[in-house]
Image (cartoon, rainbow, N blue to C red):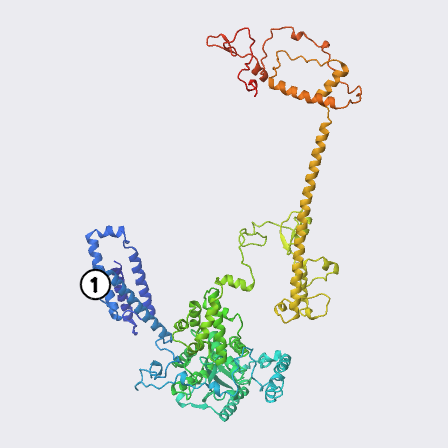
């Protein structure tokens, strides 16, 4: 359905477009479409309509199976499927793919068709990508020249050294010398390459076109080399003399020699106006000279000093040198081209500083960031008044900023960058490489004119944009070369770039291999990629082979240096295997001396924490409403703060700085009262105020943290004293804690003894107290009358005491009598203390007159257990609960038979 709709719409679109183009007499891109935009617009609409139609088809599953059951739908699907397969096979046949998409077996047909479609899509998309790259000017089918240093020499026949297919002449090849067969040019250098692990010092010793004279350090450098004054001096003293010399000129040694001239450089008005582009001469009509002698170089410098502008480019080699070698320099004027052999004239290239630093002459480069480093490092040449066409293309927002794109855009010249990675140390230069080097600068001055004109037109004639390009170019010329310095942590930067995670053993192996590669590359003046490529080094560190053959197996192809030093590499891997196996994160924390960071379970809320709470939900605090509790840095502050803030409410936490730069000096009393952490903080403050305090004669001993680890210094002994002092303080703290525990124990013992004494005194006081019975007996003796029983209430009956109670009473009376006999007679008491019994004669005894008193309606628990309990029988007669087979002559009461206290005693 979708295909039929798209076909119908396609036919109608073709008819409409044909009708329109019949009226206009113009050439069409393809039948029915006048240009690419119309074809793309129509194709996009067709694809969208087909997509919408496909979305309306029954989905796979029950819905499709339901429609499939109808014969009409089944026939329609089969016919449309055949049409689609036929169309796909035609497209695949057009692109050269396998097109037997309909001739498949029923069992594996679906899988084979799917594989064919996937392969065809890959081929078509790859071809489309290649065509798009070619439209942008990038040719990916041609590979760059990569010299293989450890392979045997052979004749290289490839696309880069074959003439174009469009030329009438037949393809030609030439013999390319490999890096292995090229003599090392470093051996011919008059001044040896400095690969030491020290900062780079500029090579300049003569400063032409100077507004500010060259510092004396550089001018005397040549004289110091010629004078053998330090030959007979001992090595240690010679080093001291060298340090004294260099310390005087530290700022001058690492400064840009033309910093002052570049800062005061102004662009003349003639360079900010719109120029008339001067057309370049054809290469065939332009003279080109190869400069390889000192006389030719001096003549070239004289020619350049008479010009107003010239173009410069450099060719560099970095594979067989640690720092790299500038192998070739190309210079072009409006009328002539020059190729300078910088390998032969390396020590005389400083002559060109006269022309390169002349502010009236414009030096045109393209992408000069690396060129500035190479000129300073190898020749001591600097550039004043630079114009970089790469920065200009960026200001113009061009599609690409490469030189080949500018050549194609402005000069309609196809540049071939296949020689960019060739070995430029080859001498003599092949003609193809010679022409390639010449073309880099031949058209650059014309591009310089065109770019300046477009910058002014782009900014409506205003020079602001052009001035910004001049300023950016001046910033590039101010760039200083920095030599790669190896440190103990250099390997970590490479590890981060590679995004590799190692354990401790692998990281140790990687560190040792990195140090070995750096050391050997500096000694042999080879690049690190030649000694041991990074990917091979990572492979060895990950695998950590147990045998030397395993190291060779990790390298493919095997670098020559690795094959020679395989036993040393094996020892390094074995050394790494002896490390304890830990994760890299834990090992990194241990090396830094840090403890593992634990995330707090409860997140603290602060009034300034707006990450989770809106401003409306934040509590409003004012400094006058609630007090603020100060933070503490040392544990000794906690006790002092608790005493002050017991009655205060805390609303926030503000930490007072313990280490400050602007603090009043403390008195001696304060210093004596400080604890060990406070003393340490005070020393840190003093180190901030004066880093050289440790060298001053003071009464207090200042300990330098860095000097603690140097056993040769006396400060190491001081650090030992500090450790001993800290240990003594810890012992004192332990003794104080022990004393506190002993005091607590003694206090508890004293409390127990006092408690026991109180108990004894209480018991003694109870022994002297006279009981009620004793008071009653004394009153009977004195008065001669006994206490009469108080009449009970009406209806009450006192319970009869049991035999247990009787015995207990008798037992209690016996000791009382013994006490009376033992105790001496007490003196007579005062009449107020004499006991007077109650006189019952005055009481009303009529209450006891009626013997038949009614039962009291109130509940009496004593009466319940001893009184007669009467229950009514089933016929309403009263029955005695206690009466059983007993005689009626006996009184009612509880039977004592069977009770435990009536049992016979043993």
Q: Position of residue 472 (x, y in %)?
A: 52, 76
Q: Horizontal and vertical percent for residue 422?
A: 41, 81
Question: Toward which corner of the image does residue 261 lie, by quadrant?
Answer: bottom right
Residue 307 position, x and y percent, is: 51, 88
Which residue lies under the disc numbered 1? 104
Location of residue 127 by image quarter: bottom left
Q: 374 or 19: nearer the eye? A: 374
Q: Which of 421 and 896 is in front in this view?
A: 896
- Identify the element where label 1 is drawn: loop
Where residue 766 sits: x, y (%)?
71, 28
Residue sticking out furthest to the front: 906
**Image quarter in which the C terminus is found:** top right
| Residue 326 in view of the camera | yes
Q: Is residue 772 visible?
A: no
Q: In this view, does 271 lie above or below 61?
A: below
Is residue 14 placed above or below 523 in the rendered structure? above
In the shown orientation, is residue 448 left or right of residue 112?
right
Q: Quadrant of the N terminus?
A: bottom left
Does residue 80 appear to the left or right of 446 in the view shown? left
């Amino acid at each position: 359905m979708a295909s039929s709709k798209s076909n119908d719409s396609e036919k109608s679109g073709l008819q409409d477009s044909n009708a329109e183009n019949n009226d206009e007499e113009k050439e069409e891109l393809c039948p029915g479409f006048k240009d690419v935009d119309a074809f793309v617009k129509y194709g996009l609409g067709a694809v969208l309509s087909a997509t919408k139609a496909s979305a309306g088809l029954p989905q796979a599953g029950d819905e499709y199976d339901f429609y499939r059951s109808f014969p009409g739908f089944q026939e329609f699907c089969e016919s449309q499927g055949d049409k689609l397969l036929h169309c796909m096979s035609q497209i695949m046949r057009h692109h050269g793919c396998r097109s037997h998409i309909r001739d498949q077996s029923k069992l594996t047909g679906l899988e084979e068709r799917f594989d064919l479609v996937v392969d065809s899509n890959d081929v078509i998309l790859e071809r489309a990508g290649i065509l798009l790259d070619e439209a942008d000017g990038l040719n990916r089918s041609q590979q760059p020249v990569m010299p293989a240093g450890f392979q045997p020499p052979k004749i290289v026949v490839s696309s880069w050294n074959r003439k174009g297919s469009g030329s009438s002449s037949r393809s030609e090849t030439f013999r390319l010398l490999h890096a292995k067969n090229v003599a090392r040019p470093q051996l011919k250098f008059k001044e040896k390459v400095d690969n030491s692990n020290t900062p780079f010092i500029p090579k300049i010793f003569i400063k032409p076109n100077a507004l500010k004279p060259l510092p004396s350090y550089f001018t005397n450098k040549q004289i110091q080399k010629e004078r053998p004054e330090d030959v007979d001096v001992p090595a240690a003293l010679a080093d001291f003399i060298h340090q004294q010399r260099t310390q005087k000129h530290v700022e001058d040694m690492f400064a840009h020699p033309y910093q002052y001239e570049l800062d005061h450089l102004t662009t003349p008005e003639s360079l900010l106006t719109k120029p008339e582009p001067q057309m370049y001469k054809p290469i065939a009509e332009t003279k080109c000279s190869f400069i390889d002698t000192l006389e030719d170089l001096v003549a070239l410098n004289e020619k350049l000093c008479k010009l107003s502008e010239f173009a410069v480019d450099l060719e560099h080699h970095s594979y067989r040198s640690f720092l790299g070698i500038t192998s070739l320099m190309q210079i072009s004027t409006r009328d002539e081209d020059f190729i300078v052999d910088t390998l032969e004239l390396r020590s005389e290239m400083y002559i060109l500083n006269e022309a390169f630093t002349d502010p009236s002459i414009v030096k045109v480069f393209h992408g000069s960031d690396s060129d500035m480093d190479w000129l300073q490092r190898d020749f001591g040449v600097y550039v004043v008044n630079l114009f970089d066409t790469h920065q200009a293309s960026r200001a113009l927002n061009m599609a690409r900023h490469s030189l080949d794109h500018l050549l194609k855009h402005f000069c309609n010249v196809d540049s071939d960058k296949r020689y960019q990675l060739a070995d430029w140390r080859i001498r003599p230069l092949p003609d193809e490489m010679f022409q390639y080097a010449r073309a880099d600068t031949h058209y650059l001055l014309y591009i310089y004119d065109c770019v300046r004109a477009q910058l002014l037109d782009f900014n409506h004639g205003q020079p602001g944009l052009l001035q910004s390009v001049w300023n950016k170019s001046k910033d590039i010329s101010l760039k200083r070369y920095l030599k790669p310095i190896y440190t103990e942590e250099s390997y970590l930067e490479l590890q981060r770039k590679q995004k590799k995670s190692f354990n401790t053993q692998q990281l140790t192996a990687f560190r040792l291999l990195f140090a070995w590669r750096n050391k050997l590359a500096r000694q042999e003046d080879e690049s690190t990629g030649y000694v041991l490529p990074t990917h091979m080094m990572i492979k060895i560190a990950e695998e950590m082979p147990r045998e030397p053959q395993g190291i060779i197996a990790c390298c493919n192809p095997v670098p020559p240096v690795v094959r020679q030093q395989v036993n040393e590499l094996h020892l390094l891997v074995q050394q790494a295997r002896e490390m304890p196996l830990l994760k890299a994160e834990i090992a990194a924390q241990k090396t830094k001396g840090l403890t593992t960071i634990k995330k707090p379970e409860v997140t603290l809320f602060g009034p300034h924490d707006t990450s989770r709470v809106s401003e409306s939900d934040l509590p409003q605090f004012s400094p006058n409403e609630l007090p603020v509790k100060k933070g503490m840095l040392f544990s000794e502050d906690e006790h002092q703060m608790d005493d002050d803030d017991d009655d205060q409410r805390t609303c926030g936490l503000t930490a007072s700085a313990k280490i400050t730069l602007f603090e009043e000096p403390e008195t001696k009393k304060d210093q004596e009262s400080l604890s060990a952490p406070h003393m340490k903080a005070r020393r840190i403050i003093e180190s901030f105020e004066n880093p050289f305090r440790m060298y001053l004669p003071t009464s207090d001993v200042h300990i330098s943290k860095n000097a603690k680890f140097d056993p040769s210094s006396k400060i190491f002994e001081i650090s030992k004293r500090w450790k001993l002092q800290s240990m003594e303080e810890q012992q004192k703290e332990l003794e104080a804690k022990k004393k506190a525990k002993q005091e607590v124990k003694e206090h508890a013992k004293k409390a127990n003894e006092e408690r026991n004494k109180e108990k004894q005194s209480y018991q003694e006081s109870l022994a002297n107290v006279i009981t009620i019975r004793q008071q009653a007996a004394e009153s009977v003796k004195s008065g001669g009358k006994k206490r009469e029983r108080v009449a009970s209430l009406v209806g009450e009956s006192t319970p009869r005491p049991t035999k247990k109670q009787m015995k207990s009473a008798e037992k209690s009376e016996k000791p009382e009598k013994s006490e009376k006999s033992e105790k001496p007679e007490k003196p007579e008491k005062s009449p107020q203390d004499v006991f007077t019994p109650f006189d019952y004669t005055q009481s009303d005894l009529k209450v006891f007159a009626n013997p038949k008193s009614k039962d009291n309606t109130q509940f009496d628990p004593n009466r319940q257990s001893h009184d007669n309990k009467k229950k009514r029988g089933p016929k309403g007669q009263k029955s005695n609960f206690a009466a059983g087979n007993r005689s009626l002559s006996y009184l009612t009461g509880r039977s004592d038979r069977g009770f435990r206290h009536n049992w016979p005693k043993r």
